[in-house]
Image (tube, rainbow, N blue to C red):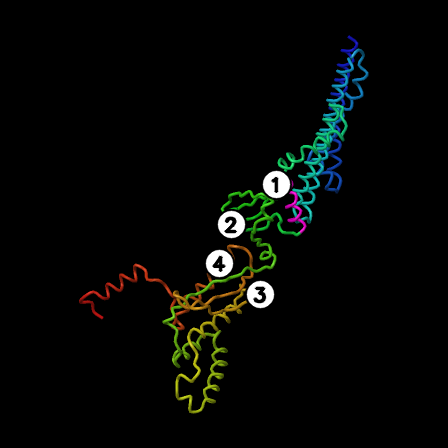
């Protein structure tokens, strides 16, 4: 009876100390953390570090109280002590794990841009493996060296089991040390179907939220074994590239006549170009002497070249085109679709919707202005074009 009474008393004392500890930590410590200006104590409380530490107190009471129970067999006493020790180790590991999570939270809330979640997960894994070894050793009575020798014999199996962990750890180190990937980066990885923002980087996976709001999960090791495009440089530069071509119908390209030149002088952005270029061409032609009578010897302005000069000036004066980045208009090799006139410049924003609006406004203006230069966009015949030809060729149609 004395043994039973002592056992009940120890259990009651352990329970009371546990309740008192939890009450103290949940009320007193919480009030203290709210009053301090430090952030680390708030993070520790939110992650439950103090709660796990409080759960260690009853196990300590049981460990010291069990030997005081009279008449308790030695094997039962040892078993209870081992179980209490295992629980204490588990609670201690959980407290350290929550502390690591709090450190990660503080790092993420601070100025840290690189993800350390993979490193924290690896530390947690090592922590739990060590705790498991300690618990097994306490139950079996074997030495840690004996356990490690057994693990060495199973190294091949362990390498297979922890293959993804090892690959993920190595990949995480490379991604972090070379600053290849951060949470918030926009990446494009066609092989994985990823085109969106990185929302999480862990030891095993990288999560990407695509622009259609789907989530793509990519193994971390794949980020160093396969290529992907990171748009961070574009976001940090403050400008996004516009690279698109207008396909001009080659049949509409011609030399400008005097009346056309006179009409184009109405365009404010062309006046300086027409004046400078006109003087240079007139001077060239005068120096030809009698050879100037042949039109093939004279220099003349073309509607396509003049349009290219207009587009260049238009982009340089556009308020939404980045003035400190490359801006040019170039003519590419003509093909079956006409003469490509490529616009190459940078919008002064990286916001997707604004960028698309700026790009569309530029090309809307240029396409609508082509007839002023006597130019036409190349376009494959549509059903409407065919119908117009058939109607115009119908017998009895007036010309």
Identified at 41% across, 69% down, the residue is 370
Q: Quadrant of the N terminus?
A: top right
> Sequence order check: which comes first, mark 1 or mark 3?
1
Q: Which residue is mark 2?
A: 190
Distance (Cα) linking label 2 and label 1: 20 Å
Q: Which residue is mark 3?
A: 325
> Sequence order check: which comes first, mark 1 or mark 4?
1
168 with respect to 387 (left or right) = right
Q: Which of pointers 4 and 2 indicates the residue nearer the eye?
A: 2
Under tag 4, what secondary structure? helix
Q: Which of pointers 1 and 4 indicates the residue nearer the eye?
A: 1
> Sequence order check: which comes first, mark 3 or mark 4?
3
Residue 258 x %, y %: 39, 81
Q: Quadrant of residue 129?
A: top right
Q: Which of pointers 3 and 2 indicates the residue nearer the eye?
A: 2
Q: Which residues are magenta?
A: 163-177
């Amino acid at each position: 009876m004395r043994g039973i009474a002592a056992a009940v008393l120890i259990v009651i004392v352990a329970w009371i100390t546990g309740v008192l500890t939890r009450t103290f930590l949940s009320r007193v410590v919480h009030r203290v953390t709210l009053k301090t200006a430090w952030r680390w104590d708030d993070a520790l409380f939110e992650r439950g570090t103090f709660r796990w530490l409080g759960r260690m107190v009853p196990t300590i009471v049981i460990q010291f109280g069990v030997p005081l129970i009279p008449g308790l067999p030695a094997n039962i006493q040892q078993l209870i002590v081992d179980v209490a020790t295992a629980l204490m180790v588990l609670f201690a590991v959980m407290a350290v794990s929550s502390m690591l999570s709090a450190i990660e939270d503080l790092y993420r809330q601070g100025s840290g841009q690189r993800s350390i979640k993979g490193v924290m997960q690896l530390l947690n894994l090592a922590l739990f493996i060590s705790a498991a070894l300690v618990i097994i050793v306490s139950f079996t009575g074997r030495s840690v060296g004996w356990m490690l020798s057994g693990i060495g014999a199973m190294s091949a199996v362990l390498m297979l089991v922890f293959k993804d962990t090892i690959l993920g750890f190595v990949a995480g180190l490379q991604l972090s040390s070379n600053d290849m990937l951060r949470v918030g980066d926009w990446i494009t990885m066609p092989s994985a179907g990823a085109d969106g923002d990185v929302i999480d980087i862990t030891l095993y996976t990288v999560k990407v939220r695509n622009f259609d709001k789907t989530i793509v999960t990519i193994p971390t090791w794949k980020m160093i074994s396969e290529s992907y495009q990171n748009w961070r440089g574009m976001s940090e530069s403050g400008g996004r590239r516009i690279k698109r071509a207008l396909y001009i119908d080659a049949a509409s390209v011609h030399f400008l006549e005097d009346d056309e030149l006179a009409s184009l002088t109405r365009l404010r952005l062309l006046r300086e170009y027409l004046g400078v270029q006109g003087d240079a061409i007139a001077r060239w032609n005068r120096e030809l002497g009698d050879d100037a009578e042949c039109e093939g010897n004279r220099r003349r302005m073309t509607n396509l070249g003049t349009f290219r000069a207009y587009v260049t000036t238009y982009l340089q004066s556009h308020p939404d085109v980045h003035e400190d980045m490359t801006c040019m208009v170039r003519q590419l090799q003509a093909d079956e679709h006409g003469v490509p006139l490529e616009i190459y410049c940078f919008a002064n924003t990286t916001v997707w919707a604004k960028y698309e609006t700026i790009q569309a406004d530029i090309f809307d203006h240029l396409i609508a202005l082509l007839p002023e230069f006597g130019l036409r966009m190349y376009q494959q015949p549509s059903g409407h074009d065919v119908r117009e030809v058939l109607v115009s060729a119908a017998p009895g149609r007036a010309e």
